[in-house]
Amino acid sequence: MATQLQHAKRTSGELTGELAFMNDRAAELDAQVTRVLGRADLDEPTAELLRLLAGHKGAANAICIREIVERLTLNVEQWDPRTVKAAVKDLVERFGIPIGGSRKKPYGYFLILTAEDQADAARPLRRELESLSRRLRKLIGKMETARLFGQIQLQLDRQDGGKAT
């Protein structure tokens, strides 16, 4: 009985710590979104998408492309699934917003809140990269593929200003 009570207290304490971390992380995300929304190089349609995604933190709160298109089309005529994907790519690559995409229920885009969200969002991208790499090796060979990956890494390093990420 005492062991069960100790386990319950420890589990409760762990949950409290996890909730505090998630609240801190949510506040960091809000601050990052606010900074990006204040940038002059962010166009209004993409800002509208970012404001919508800011309300969808964590994989459990993902919003599907269909709903994004429906909600944003009320304000901007140009939204379609391809435009949403391009804007998400821009928000991630150019502005550093940690947006994940879930390919399992609930499907859709979300702001990455936890390490688990990050792993879940990266997993399909990694599998896609591995698949493309296998195809590339068959087409251009092992050595040329390795050389190409080295070049890509150098380009990424230059784009990041040489900073390791």
Image (cartoon, grey):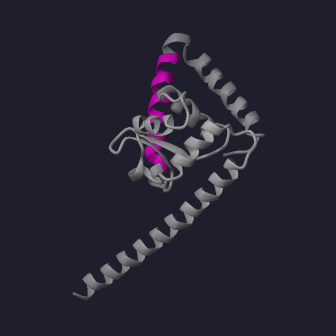
Question: As rendered, which of 131 and 143 lies closer to the eye?
Answer: 131
- Where is residue 31? Give x, y as percent: 64, 58
Query: Residue placed at 50% from the left, 55% from the top?
Result: 113
Residue 88 lies in the magenta-colored region: no
- Where is residue 148? Give x, y as percent: 64, 21
Query: Residue placed at 31% from the left, 79% from the top?
Result: 8
Query: Residue placed at 35% from the left, 75% from the top?
Result: 11
- Determine the residue located farthest toward the top in the rendered image: 139
- Where is residue 3? Give x, y as percent: 27, 84
5 relative to 44 in the view: left or right: left
Please tell me whether the stretch drawn in magenta is mainly helix, strand or loop. Answer: helix
66 relative to 156 in the view: left or right: left
Image quadrant containing the N terminus = bottom left
- Where is residue 13? Give x, y as percent: 41, 78
- Determine the residue located farthest toward the left in the rendered image: 1
Up the image or down, 140 lies above or below 70; here it is above
Query: Residue placed at 50% from the left, 26% from the top?
Result: 82
Up the image or down, 99 lies above or below 133; here it is below
Question: As rendered, which of 147 and 51 lies closer to the eye?
Answer: 51
Number of numbered markers: 0
Residue 131 lies in the magenta-colored region: yes
Up the image or down, 36 lies above or below 144; here it is below
Q: Which range is magenta?
A: 118-136
Give residue 42's quadrant in the image.
Answer: top right
- Determine the residue located farthest toward the front in the rendered image: 74
